[in-house]
Structure formats: structure tokens, C-alpha cells
Image: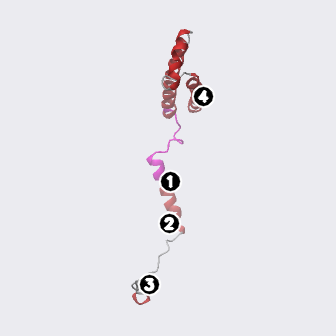
């Protein structure tokens, strides 16, 4: 239950993070020359809020990911023991019903000797 809630919150936080990043003004590149007009008109504070929001959302996503991983059910968390159990069950199933076919090795008189290549004239 907690795992599903965490995954849902991670999805919501991810969508909000994407929107917050897309709304921000670039700080370098060609658009940086137009940054002075934004500071004069009072957009500077909203840029700080968007930047703080971006960092907070990134931290929330990391924390929720850790909580979701810790709250996984034992069935979802396939570790070394689960893989070994699956492999043993498969070996028992295959070992009782199937045999491995063997390849036939030709006798030495059946082998055609390699002929050397003749140079082209």
C-alpha cells in the first residue's frame, strides 16, 4: 500500500518538476543577454522560487524513491535467494523430462582434406 502511494507521489512530483524546469529562464547561452530586462521588471524573485522548487522536488523524488524501495513487498524484491529458487525449480523440471542431444563427431576417414587454393592467373 505504501509502495503504491510512493509511486503515485513520485509521478506527480516528476510532472511538476518537468513543468518547473520548462518555465525557468536559461542562465547561459544566447538567452542570457536578455536577463537584464527580467531583473529590472521584477521577475528575479520568481526565478528564485522556481529554482528552490526544482531543488525541493528533486529531493522529494529521491526521498520517495528510497521509501518506496524500503516498503517493497517480499514478492517484488527478487534477491539472490529468489533467483536460486527459480533456477532450482527449472532444473528439476528440465532434468526429469529432457535429455541434452549429443553432437556426432565424424570419423577421421569421413573428413575431406582441405585443398590448397590455387593462385589466379
Mark sitting on residue 106 = 3
In three-dimensional space, the C-alpha distance between marks 1 and 3, rounded to whole angstroms, equals 38 Å
* Quadrant of image for the C terminus: bottom left
- Pointer 1 residue: 86
The magenta segment: 70-85
Relative horizontal placement of residue 41, taking residue 88 as reference (left or right):
right
Q: Which callout, 1 or 4, points at the residue further toward the start of the chain?
A: 4
- Above or below — where is 32 with respect to 69? above
Closest to the camera, between mark 3 and mark 4, is 4
Q: Position of residue 118 (x, y in %)?
A: 41, 85
- Above or below — where is 19 with respect to 86? above
Closest to the camera, between mark 2 and mark 3, is 3
In this view of the protein, can residue 7 be seen by the observer? yes
Residues at marks 1 and 3 touching, judged by CB atoms closer than 8 Å: no
In three-dimensional space, the C-alpha distance between marks 3 and 4, rounded to whole angstroms, equals 65 Å
Closest to the camera, between mark 1 and mark 4, is 4
Disc 2 crowd rating (10 Å Cα; few below 14, some 14-19, many 20+) is few
In three-dimensional space, the C-alpha distance between marks 2 and 3, rounded to whole angstroms, equals 28 Å
Q: Which residue appears at 57% of the width and 23% of the height?
A: 20
Give the quarter of the image for residue 106.
Answer: bottom left
- Above or below — where is 24 with respect to 107? above
Describe the colour scheme in one phrase. secondary structure
Q: Which callout, 2 or 4, points at the residue further toward the start of the chain?
A: 4
* Quadrant of image for the N terminus: top right
Examine the structure image and report whether residue 74 is included in the region drawn in magenta: yes
Q: Secondary structure at mark 1?
A: helix
Relative horizontal placement of residue 73, taking residue 121 as reference (left or right):
right
Closest to the camera, between mark 2 and mark 4, is 4
In this view of the protein, can residue 57 be seen by the observer? no
In front of the other: 21 or 29 = 29
- Pointer 4 residue: 15
- Pointer 2 residue: 95
Amino acid at each position: 500500500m505504501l509502495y503504491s502511494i510512493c509511486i503515485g507521489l513520485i509521478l506527480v512530483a516528476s510532472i511538476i518538476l518537468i513543468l518547473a524546469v520548462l518555465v525557468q529562464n536559461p542562465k547561459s547561452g544566447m538567452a542570457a543577454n536578455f536577463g537584464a530586462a527580467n531583473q529590472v521588471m521584477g521577475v528575479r524573485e520568481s526565478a528564485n522560487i522556481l529554482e528552490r522548487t526544482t531543488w525541493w522536488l528533486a529531493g522529494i523524488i529521491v526521498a520517495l524513491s528510497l521509501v518506496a524501495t524500503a516498503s517493497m513487498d517480499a514478492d517484488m524484491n527478487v534477491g539472490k535467494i529468489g533467483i536460486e529458487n527459480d533456477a532450482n525449480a527449472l532444473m528439476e523440471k528440465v532434468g526429469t523430462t529432457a535429455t541434452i542431444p549429443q553432437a556426432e563427431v565424424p570419423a577421421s576417414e569421413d573428413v575431406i582434406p582441405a585443398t590448397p587454393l590455387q593462385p589466379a592467373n
